[in-house]
Image (cartoon, helix red, strand yellow):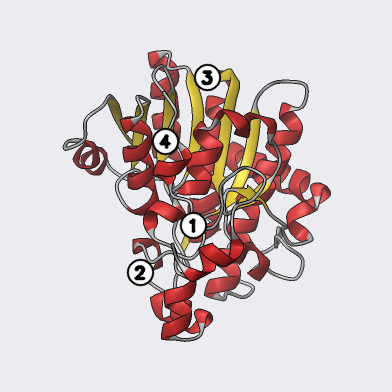
Amino acid sequence: MSLVAALKGNGPTGFGYGSTADEVVKDLNLEGKNILITGCNSGLGLYTMQTLSQKGARIIAAARTIEKAKNATQDLSGEFLPMACELSEPTSVAKCADELVKRGEHIDVILCNAGIMALPKLQVQHGLELQFLTNHIGHFILITRLLDQLKDDGRVVLLSSSAHQMAPKKGIELDNLDGKQGYKPWRAYGQSKLANLLCARELARRFEGSHKTANAVHPGVIMTNLGRHSQGDVINFLGSTLGNALFLKSIPQGAASQTYLAAHPDAAKYSGEYFADCNVAKSSAHGKDMALAQALWEKSEEIVKDFNL
């Protein structure tokens, strides 16, 4: 156990900073569960997929290409349905969702794990800044097209980040979603992660009166290929080599919170929450702004409608 884990201890859920995905599901049997995971081929997504499949869950393994999805699952034991889902291409996301609908898949969990981070230069695709398009709109399309496939007690888990606090002063720049009025890598990343959090909050509001849940997660600071564009920035943010040793989580630890929300029976009582270290955590003021959450949802619907999917 790391020094930080020892100091922080466990929270009300019985888990905490140092908990791993394996510990979260240690005593669970997930046979009969159908779990969709985006970004299944590396980092947290791959580890979460491995952990849940070992407990009997059937995994709908989504990656940017069918080859990546198949390669991620080929050496694992369990039942998998590899799917292509390129989140920056609306037609790819729609095709993935529509194929699952056509197959009659009933889904217990939609785990929106994939994402890109802190692109050094502005990249615009389909009229949107690429991080906002990939991290938020891609998952928004996937979720909304699969809502009818979500089981009555289904769960939606979106990977956010404490970086949502780096979002612009107004939270979501609804008038600058292409970034052309000004672009900073971490601000744009923070905006996309704030969008993930607000999407979970608004979805939870829409789930009220049902047994369905939606929550957002900060996994912790982990060196995965997500940070391939910005590892130096992350290290500088942490401060020093000693800081890295203290504050960086392992991939098994980083996957714990999303695994808890996806699979643990006790997590069914949480909805509309922001989680870190396997427990409810505080978000920024923008992260709790339900008027902004609704405005973002409506703007997202407009954007998707214009794609004519």
Considering only order in the chain, which callout, 2 or 1, is on the residue closer to the N terminus? 1
> Within 10 angstroms of label 4, few (less than 14), some, or many (20 or more) residues?
few
Amino acid tagged 3: Gln
User: Could you tell me if the residues under marks 4 and 2 are in contact, i.e. CB atoms within 8 Å?
Assistant: no
Above/below status of 146 relative to 180? above
Is 146 displayed left or right of 114 in the figure?
Answer: right
Residue ID for mark 1: 18
Above/below status of 255 relative to 244? above
Considering only order in the chain, which callout, 1 or 4, is on the residue closer to the N terminus? 1
Gap between marks 3 and 2, in whole Å? 34 Å
Residue ID for mark 3: 149
Label 2 residue SS: loop
Gap between marks 4 and 1, in whole Å? 15 Å
Considering only order in the chain, which callout, 2 or 3, is on the residue closer to the N terminus? 3
User: Could you tell me if the residues under marks 3 and 4 are in contact, i.e. CB atoms within 8 Å?
Assistant: no
Q: Is residue 308 visible?
A: no
Residue ID for mark 2: 228
Considering only order in the chain, which callout, 2 or 4, is on the residue closer to the N terminus? 4
Amino acid tagged 4: Lys
